[in-house]
Amino acid sequence: MATVIRLARFGAKKRPYYHIVVTDSRNARNSGNILEVVGKYDPMLARDNEKRVVLKADEIKAWLGKGAKPSDRVYRFLANAGLVAARKVPNQTKKNLQSEKTQMKIKDKQEKLAKIAEEKAAAEAAAKAAAEAPAAEAPASTEAVAE
């Protein structure tokens, strides 16, 4: 018999409440043919509430020792409680990124725009300096003519 540790739904409509049960994997979720209730889960409570997930650690360890496999959600509960090692998070694919060639084109375009902006700023600074230099010299030459 393949035993699993999973959630069995109880509670009212739109007010879920779950029992964490040990059952045969071939049974339906709420069939009633459970071997043991090993915890409770109330998703309506706040995440930091200690009564949100209540586990019977000794009984869960015993069932895990007998070969019971926890469901994904129950595995997370057990990992958070420190009863099992946390699962490794797989590396995400990079399908959302553009191809390497497109990224290179974008980078080259940004570099060109930055270079053009630098040249434009340098040209404006030179023009401003050139405009200020004759303006500064012009009053000096008018003073010489006035004398």
Image (cartoon, rainbow, N blue to C red):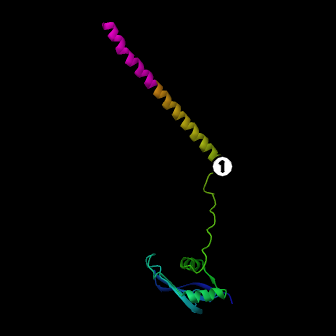
Q: Position of residue 131 (x, y in %)?
A: 42, 21
Look at label 1 and name its amino acid.
Answer: Glu
**Residue 99: image location, x then y, percent:** 65, 51
Dot 1 crowding, Cα within 10 Å, few <14, some 14–19, many 20+: few
Q: Report whether 137 appears left or right of 120.
A: left
Q: Position of residue 68 (x, y in %)?
A: 64, 86
- Look at 49% across and 27% down and name the residue there: 123
> Which quadrant holds residue 7?
bottom right
Q: Is residue 102 above or below residue 61?
A: above
Circle 1 residue: 100
Image position of 113 (left or right of 12):
right
Q: Quadrant of the C terminus?
A: top left
Residue under the point 37% across and 15% down: 138
**Image x and y of residue 79, in percent:** 57, 77
Classify residue 145 by image quadrant: top left
Please name whichever residue, 143 or 34, is drawn nearer the observer in this view of the structure.
143
Q: At 63% from the left edge and 47% from the top edge, which residue is drawn?
A: 102
Residue 88 horizontal side relative to residue 13, left or right: right
Is residue 51 on the magenta stretch?
Answer: no
Q: Nearer the viewer, residue 27 or 60?
A: 60
Q: Main secondary structure of the magenta part?
A: helix
Secondary structure under tag 1 reads helix
Report the magenta residues as a range. Answer: 127-147
Choose between 137 and 90: the one closer to the eye: 137
